[in-house]
Image: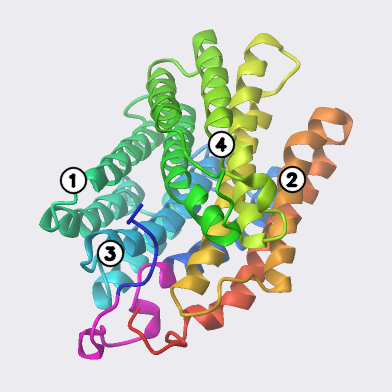
Amino acid sequence: MNETLTPLVRADHETPAGLSLGRKGFRPFFLLASAFAAVIAPLWLLVFLGVIHPGSYLVPIYWHAHEMVFGFAVAVIAGFLLTAVGNWTKQETAVGAPLLGLAVLWMAGRFAVTFATSLPRGVAAVVDLAFLPALMIALGRPIVRAKNTRNLIMVAVLGALWLANLAVHLDALGIVTGWQRRGCIVGVDIVVLLMLVMVGRVLPMFTRNVTAAASIRSHATLDRLTLAAMVCLTLLDVVKPDHALNGAVSAVVGVLATARAVHWGMQFAMRTPLLWILHFGYLWIPIGLLLRGWAVIDPAMSSSLATHALTAGAIGSLTLGMMARVTLGHTGHVLEASPWITFAFVLVTLAAVARVFGPMLLPAEYLHFLECAGILWSVAFAIYVIVDAPILLRRRVDGKPG
């Protein structure tokens, strides 16, 4: 596969001028996303415990869900795609002032949603909804210019994510009803779909490159079936998210997602933190989908645990793992996780285990497991900020652009 995440090589005079933070999409967005993740988890715990009270624009639990999906996850996706599309097309997406402008627009959305009740009606929606179209333009232009039509699917996925976000805001504004929850569920589905696409593209390649295991391979038919089934599940959640059919389809996607990864070489990756965190992160996807199917047939199984397997587990682990890997690779460093970053990988994994399996095994200790998971998650991303912020804020160590 030629679409790797290796840095673009350009002449020095073509290097964008200005702050190093504006030289590549991953720099500002990974820094913002990780800092936001470190803050939002303890903030949600304070809301959940009744210590602080957010405004009434969104129901508190859906404010939490919205900000984790359309805030945190979207920022990581933006950083990744702004970097990757540049490499796929051999053209820049957004650098310098336009890139930093996108970052400011994302931050404005976070403040607008949090303080929506202090703003004129509709302002929070307008500000928050402006980011994804701007990102789509930044990504779409080089894709169209390069005739890289295969990757237009990424722009389409972002458009679907924007529609889910729009539904949440329309509900918050009283224009439609019942879409705060449904929009967040569909948002998670779309992010999972994007993870299934991207991890399938890169993880077998990453593992084969490091381990040289000849048995590592992808299965194109299973890849297509998995993605098609996930699209069906997303559409079903748009129509009626709590239907029993959705649980059955979710279980099918979970089985397919497991089957496609059988030959991805997870057994060879355990000695390499930058690999095992991605394999473990991917594993949370079928776990979450299968738990969701289980919740349909067993009333004792909380659908929230399935959701958090996909969010705290898959999204948390995969975003942290990819941010760490891309940060090293695109700044000229050796692809080897430091002890502190490895520790962060362990913490984010334990956070997901505590959030999903703790309440499942000991329901009476739910609150303690929630607090434990939130603290572990926050510390994991705080470690990334402390360790990798100096790297993100400096030029590449090898002197290349980017």
* Contact flag, marks 3 and 1 (Cβ < 8 Å): no
Q: Residue at x 52, y 59 (%)?
A: 209
Instruction: Name the spot of residue 134 as percent of width and height, x first.
Output: 24, 56
- The answer to if 21 sits in the magenta stretch is yes
| Residue matched to label 4 | 261
Q: With 320 as the anchor, is 227 left or right in this view?
A: left
Name the residue nearer the viewer: 264 or 159: 264
Read off the magenta span.
Answer: 9-28
Residue 248's image quarter? top right
| Residue matched to label 3 | 86
Instruction: Name the spot of residue 318 as percent of width and height, x first.
Output: 56, 51
- The answer to if 262 sits in the magenta stretch is no
Q: With 385 as the anchor, is 195 left or right in this view?
A: left
Q: With 285 as the anchor, is 20 left or right in this view?
A: left
* Distance Cα–Cα, label 1 vs label 4: 26 Å
Badge 1, how many Cα within 10 Å: few under 14, some, many 20+?
A: few
Badge 2, how many Cα within 10 Å: few under 14, some, many 20+?
A: few
* Distance Cα–Cα, label 1 vs label 2: 48 Å
* Contact flag, marks 2 and 3 (Cβ < 8 Å): no
Camera-side mark, 1 or 2: 1
Camera-side mark, 3 or 4: 4
* Distance Cα–Cα, label 3 vs label 1: 14 Å
Instruction: Name the spot of residue 93 as percent of width and height, x first.
Output: 24, 65
| Residue matched to label 2 | 49
Specify which label sits upstream in the sequence, 3 or 4.
3
Camera-side mark, 2 or 4: 4
Q: Amino acid at mark 1?
A: Thr
Q: Amino acid at mark 2?
A: Leu
Specify which label sits upstream in the sequence, 1 or 4.
1
Specify which label sits upstream in the sequence, 2 or 3.
2
